[in-house]
Amino acid sequence: MGFFDFFRARPTPDGFADLVLRQVRQRHPGSACRYEAAAFRIVLGGGEQRIFNLDNAYRDYCAAPRKLRAQVLQNYLAGIDVPALPATFAEAREHLMPVIRSRSQGDYLRLLALRQPPRPALADAWLALDGDALILLAHDTAASMATIGQATLAQWGVTFEQALAVAMENLRARTPHRFQVLGDGLLMGEWHDAYDSSRLLLPDLLYRACAGGEPLVMIPTRGRFLLASSHNVAGQLRMVALADKLMQDEGRHVSPAMYGVRQGKIVACQPEDAAVAAALARLHAMIRAHHYGEQKQEWDALNESTGEDVFVATCMLFQSKGSEGVVSLATWTRGIETLLPRTDIVAMVVPADDGGAGVTKMLAWDDALAIGGELMQEIECYPVRYRVQGFPSPQSLAAAPVWDS
């Protein structure tokens, strides 16, 4: 890489990888270290390998102001040097923090770990948050942050709930009233400490910040917290639009859901205004299709490595007639074992054979389930997929109603 590459507004991926590689070698002199361009990652070590994926680091490095890029890079490099966790809960408690992660991230890491055994999966100690997110525990120091698994909790002699209670106390102590006013009654958290999205778990904060009505919150990415009142439709519309932009621009998705407080609990809720509900449904569909795409990419790579012959169907989107909404579609083809995503519409495909013409019939999901549910085996993944090895009979397919747009 040339000297002047570092002065470009946006370094190339390979140029960024070269910069990271030189930094890693300085931190770990004598250790085996290589850049794998196809996977866009750094692999450190021989037998006990550690893998440093570069996608998020590269995205954040390019998005940061030039004067802050060095610090962004150092923050990521600190993840390579994660020290051992404390041996006792007493040593760890002041550094415990709650983190919220997307359920789809857990599935992505699970598939990645199956294909790349040295890579760890998502921590196995978590609590499901209503919607599509998980609450985990992190041990956070100035040098590193690591998520906490069941084995560590067992070693400390505490339950997940006990450790979470301590983490929540720590989060509350680190949460001053700090919001940016964006207009139309929309507020955005201004903590910038990697726990902005975790503040969703503080109902008292939500009510203090909300100007009348019930607080509605979105946490589209890890570093974002958006709040509007249930009485303010303009603020809700602006919140959904901003969440959409942030999820496109920043990556590190957490959730496209809109959250509220019901009887002291944080729950995903449906907006009362039709326009807000429609905008939120569109965002959900777009993000779900994105997660299905990531899932397909990892599953295809896993199948190639294991030699399994199964088609991982794509979740496709198209515009609804006469509206701004989107509709999802996947194909189920006779004679092809398929991992089928849950979509609004299923294209039932009968290939041409013996000189006969092929047939494709569009069915609503519930109608496809009615004629082929016994052939669909739900598998462990998120978003959900179904393994289909058979195909409905010609008679039941002919009798099923065609999807009406």
Image: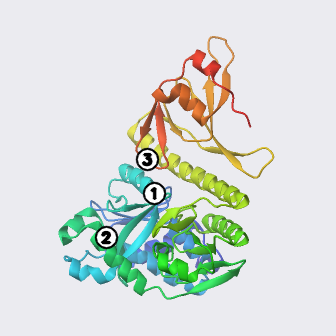
Q: Which residue is mark 1?
A: 103
Q: Earlier in the sequence, mark 3 or mark 2?
A: 2
Mark 2: amino acid: Ser
Whether residues under marks 2 and 1 lie with C-beta atoms below 8 angstroms apart, the answer is no
Q: Report the residue at 63% width, 69% height from top.
A: 246
Q: Which residue is mark 2?
A: 31
Residue 152: quadrant of the picture: bottom left
Q: Which label sits in the foreground, 3 or 2?
A: 3
Q: Earlier in the sequence, mark 1 or mark 3?
A: 1
Mark 3: amino acid: Cys
Tell me if 284 is positioned left or right of 102 in this view. right
Residue closest to the eye, 250 or 45: 250
Q: Residue lying farthest top? A: 354
Where residue 45 appears, as percent x and y from the top left, is 31, 65
Q: Report the residue at 67% width, 21% height from top.
A: 359
Label 1 sits on a secondary structure element that is: helix
Label 3 sits on a secondary structure element that is: loop
Neighbor class of circle 2 (other Cα within 10 Å; few <14, some 14-19, many 20+) is: few
Neighbor class of circle 1 (other Cα within 10 Å; few <14, some 14-19, many 20+) is: many
Where residue 176 appears, as percent x and y from the top left, is 49, 88
Q: Which residue is mark 3?
A: 381
